[in-house]
């Protein structure tokens, strides 16, 4: 399992698992199927309903634009995910922690001609497999990569592993349902960082995170132990959402 540390614009470093070459290929294959089915349906509509008999017109004005724009527009409007990427659970992210912009997605798509289409994917496969950040040419030039976004609930915390059902554990903060899996991942990352590197900056991030969560969840009492408080939120979330 290859991972990468990305520091967000809020100066919080989060460790993500990089998407594997197999996951990229599978996502690409699913997108190919989606595009093929969509084009087949459009062809039936245009050839049937509108009486188009010139297949060349359909190819130039429908097929080629759809193929060229599908990935670009899907990633731009769907937060770095095409349909295939969303199904597999991977997405495009910037290595500097900022949200990718249209130019970043455009760069990735533009370099597909070289590292995927013209080389039959061999250049992309070689670079993704060998580079430390799992980047193909498009990623290198756009300063992006693909990460896994599906949430892993195996937190490796002893007090969490003992929890199974609501019958065995009563959540202290039921309002934790307001949070989502990304919030839990951030909480877990902050806990790990503070425990591994208990320096001043990480402790300040911990303090800010706790205060933000207290306000968001309407928790008025000040926790005696910030780490225990965050672990309790994780436990409550697991029990209430599993």
Image: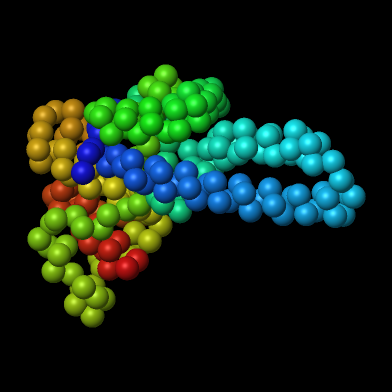
Q: Residue 97 placed where, x, y %?
A: 36, 28
30 relative to 63 in the view: left or right:
left
**Quarter of the image holding residue 235?**
bottom left
In the image, residue 19 sits, relative to residue 5, either above or below, namely below
User: Toward the viewer: 153 or 43?
Assistant: 43
158 relative to 27 in the view: left or right:
left
Q: Residue 88 placed where, x, y %?
A: 41, 51
Which residue is at a point 28% across and 34% down the rendered structure image? 129
Q: Residue 126 placed where, x, y %?
A: 32, 30
Which residue is at a point 25% across and 58% down the rendered structure image? 153
Q: Residue 131 placed where, x, y %?
A: 27, 27
Which residue is at a point 23% across and 38% down the rendered structure image? 3
Q: Quadrant of the N terminus?
A: top left
Outermost residue to the bottom: 167
User: Toward the viewer: 97 or 159?
Assistant: 97
Q: Quadrant of the C terminus?
A: bottom left
In the image, residue 237 sits, relative to residue 190, either above or below, namely below
**Quarter of the image holding residue 154?**
bottom left
Q: Is residue 13 visible from the viewing direction of this image?
A: no
User: Toward the viewer: 27 or 113?
Assistant: 113
133 relative to 119 in the view: left or right:
left
């Amino acid at each position: 399992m290859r991972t990468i540390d990305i520091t967000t614009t809020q100066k919080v470093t989060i460790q993500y698992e990089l998407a594997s070459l197999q996951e990229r290929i599978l996502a690409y294959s699913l997108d190919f199927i989606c595009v093929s089915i969509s084009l087949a349906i459009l062809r039936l509509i245009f050839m049937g309903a509108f009486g188009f008999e010139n297949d060349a017109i359909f190819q130039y004005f429908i097929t080629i634009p759809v193929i060229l724009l599908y990935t670009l527009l899907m990633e731009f409007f769907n937060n770095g995910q095409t349909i295939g990427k969303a199904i597999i659970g991977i997405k495009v992210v910037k290595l500097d922690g900022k949200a990718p912009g249209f130019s970043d997605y455009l760069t990735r798509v533009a370099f597909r001609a070289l590292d995927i289409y013209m080389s039959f994917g061999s250049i992309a496969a070689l670079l993704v497999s060998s580079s430390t950040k799992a980047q193909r040419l498009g990623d290198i030039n756009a300063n992006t990569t693909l990460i896994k976004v599906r949430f892993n609930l195996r937190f490796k915390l002893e007090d969490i592993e003992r929890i199974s059902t609501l019958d065995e554990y009563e959540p202290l903060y039921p309002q934790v349902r307001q949070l989502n899996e990304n919030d839990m991942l951030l909480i877990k990352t902050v806990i790990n960082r503070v425990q591994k590197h208990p320096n001043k900056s990480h402790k300040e991030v911990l303090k800010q995170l706790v205060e933000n969560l207290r306000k968001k969840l309407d928790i008025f009492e000040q926790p005696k132990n910030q780490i225990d408080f965050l672990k309790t939120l994780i436990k409550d979330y697991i029990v209430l959402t599993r």
